[in-house]
Image (spheres, rainbow, N blue to C red):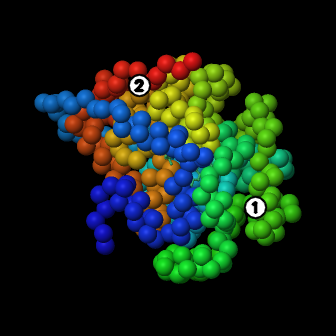
């Protein structure tokens, strides 16, 4: 059993144990991957302010996101095809999140269905919706999420059209993988993954197959997905979804102050400052760089969350100190899942929690609620003058 001390360790194991096409799917950004790199590089530019001779006993990372208690303000972000990183991946990740006391967000593009996850967990999870042209299908998804007692709907606004990721095209990404000679050789070297997949019936997009019209098998599904994301999604449609859902609503993919103001006027319960982990608009600024402006614009009117680039508890602390009330991890838990299944997701959460806790202590803070800009050393001009 390897000794895991960091998210980077989990990433190395993930690469070794999951088929190349799925590791590559996770570990890529769109086009030149500039935004993907900036997301992590910009976190590294921010430094922490050391404080000494402060009583650091009785520390707590417990907090709330949209009024729900969380063991730390870190949720699992919606990630498509999670069930291809590890057999039954969404169920494993949801269970790890439940045990840890943080929210799990199920993607529309998941392998395990809403019902699969609900049947294997007891804590309510969050459901992420992609808006499709097929309105009956969208209405059906919302009803299914209600029936599964999902406690928030996360509506993703930054993917009406797919940002190109070169590796996915080159690898012929599909779920399940096609049995070409190249894939066969690759999978033969990943026996744990292969046997696990043979043992589960969950190998395709089960939120969609059997629920949307004219989608009986995977080959038509891929065509259907490309055709089906709704390019006409606008604030009017967002309002319709809000009305149909009627519960807590989180708008994901806000990276602009005007959009943030619009979202706050609209009455969202929270917004997620996000560039989709650098997977959509390559050339957009990193989330951590945009976060302070958005907090300044709307932080008193709507709960501001952030994701994109978090690889450690230090990063979580930096995001909170910059004004986020909650954060999400995508790849950081996917590495854990691909490395060691449910135990790997737990490990990722433990690593991040411990780093957050110790960093808080060394910064002289005992309660995560008190973390603020005073804990940071931010280089002058970090936010940049962009015209
Ligand atoms: C492999 C992968 C698949 C993703 N799929 C979805 C998705 O289905 N829906 C969604 O809203 N966001 C999706 N995202 C974006 C994540 O929710 C999140 O915004 C992003 O991973 C944050 O960046 P990080 O990976 O650097 O933490 C995906 C991200 C990755 C890495």
Q: Judge the density around disc 1: few (<14), some (14-19), many (≥20) Cα neighbours within 10 Å.
A: some
In the foreground, 71 or 20: 20
Q: Which residue is mark 1?
A: 222
Q: Quick check: can you spot residue 364?
A: no
Identity of the residue drawn at 37% across and 56% down: 8
Quarter assignment of residue 200: bottom right
Which mark is drawn over residue 382? 2
Mark 1 or mark 2, which is nearer the start of the sequence? 1
Quarter assignment of residue 118: bottom right
Q: Is residue 194 above or below residue 23?
A: below
- Which percent across, then down, holds residue 349? 39, 53
Q: Nearer the viewer, mark 2 or mark 1?
A: 2
- Which percent across, then down, holds residue 208? 74, 60
Quarter assignment of residue 90: bottom right
Q: Judge the density around disc 2: few (<14), some (14-19), many (≥20) Cα neighbours within 10 Å.
A: few
Position of the C terminus by quadrant = top right
Q: Is mark 2 within 8 Å of ligand 1?
A: no
> Circle 2 — which element?
loop
The Cα–Cα distance between marks 2 and 1, rounded to whole angstroms, is 41 Å
> Circle 1 — which element?
helix
Q: Is residue 7 left or right of residue 337?
A: left
- Which percent across, then down, holds residue 219? 78, 68
- Which percent across, then down, holds residue 186? 54, 76
In the foreground, 222 or 323: 222
Q: Is residue 29 left or right of residue 329?
A: right
Q: Is residue 378 above or below residue 226?
A: above
């Amino acid at each position: 059993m390897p000794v895991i001390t960091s998210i980077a360790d989990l990433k190395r194991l993930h690469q070794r144990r999951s088929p190349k096409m799925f590791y590559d799917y996770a570990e890529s950004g769109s086009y030149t991957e500039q935004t993907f790199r900036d997301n992590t590089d910009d976190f590294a530019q921010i430094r922490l302010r050391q404080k000494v001779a402060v009583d650091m006993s009785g520390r707590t990372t417990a907090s709330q996101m949209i009024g729900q208690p969380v063991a730390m303000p870190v949720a699992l972000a919606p990630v498509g095809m999670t069930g291809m990183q590890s057999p039954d991946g969404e169920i494993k990740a949801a269970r790890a999140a439940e045990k840890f006391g943080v929210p799990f967000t199920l993607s529309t593009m998941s392998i395990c269905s809403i019902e699969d996850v609900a049947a294997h967990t007891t804590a309510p999870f969050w459901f992420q919706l992609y808006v499709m042209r097929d309105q009956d299908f969208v209405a059906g998804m919302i009803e299914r999420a209600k029936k599964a007692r999902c406690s928030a709907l996360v509506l993703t606004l930054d993917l009406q059209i797919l940002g190109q990721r070169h590796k996915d095209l080159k690898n012929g990404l599909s779920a399940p993988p096609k049995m070409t000679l190249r894939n066969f050789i690759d999978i033969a070297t990943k026996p744990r993954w292969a046997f696990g997949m043979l043992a589960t019936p969950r190998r395709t997009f089960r939120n969609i197959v059997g629920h949307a019209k004219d989608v009986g098998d995977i080959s038509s599904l891929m065509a259907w997905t490309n055709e089906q994301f709704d390019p006409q999604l606008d604030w009017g449609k967002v309002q319709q979804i809000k009305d149909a859902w009627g519960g807590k609503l989180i708008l994901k993919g806000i990276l602009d102050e005007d959009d943030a103001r619009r979202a706050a006027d609209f009455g969202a319960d929270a917004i997620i400052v996000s560039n989709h982990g650098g997977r959509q608009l390559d050339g957009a600024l990193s989330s951590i760089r945009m976060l302070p402006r958005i907090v300044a614009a709307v932080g008193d009117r709507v709960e501001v969350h952030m994701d994109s680039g978090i690889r450690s508890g230090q990063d979580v602390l930096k995001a909170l100190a910059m004004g986020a009330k909650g954060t999400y991890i995508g790849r950081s838990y996917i590495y854990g899942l691909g490395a060691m299944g449910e135990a790997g997701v737990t490990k990722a959460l433990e690593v991040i929690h411990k780093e957050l806790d110790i960093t808080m202590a060394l910064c002289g803070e005992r309660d995560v609620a008190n973390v603020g800009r005073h804990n940071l050393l931010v280089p002058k001009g970090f936010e940049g003058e962009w015209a």
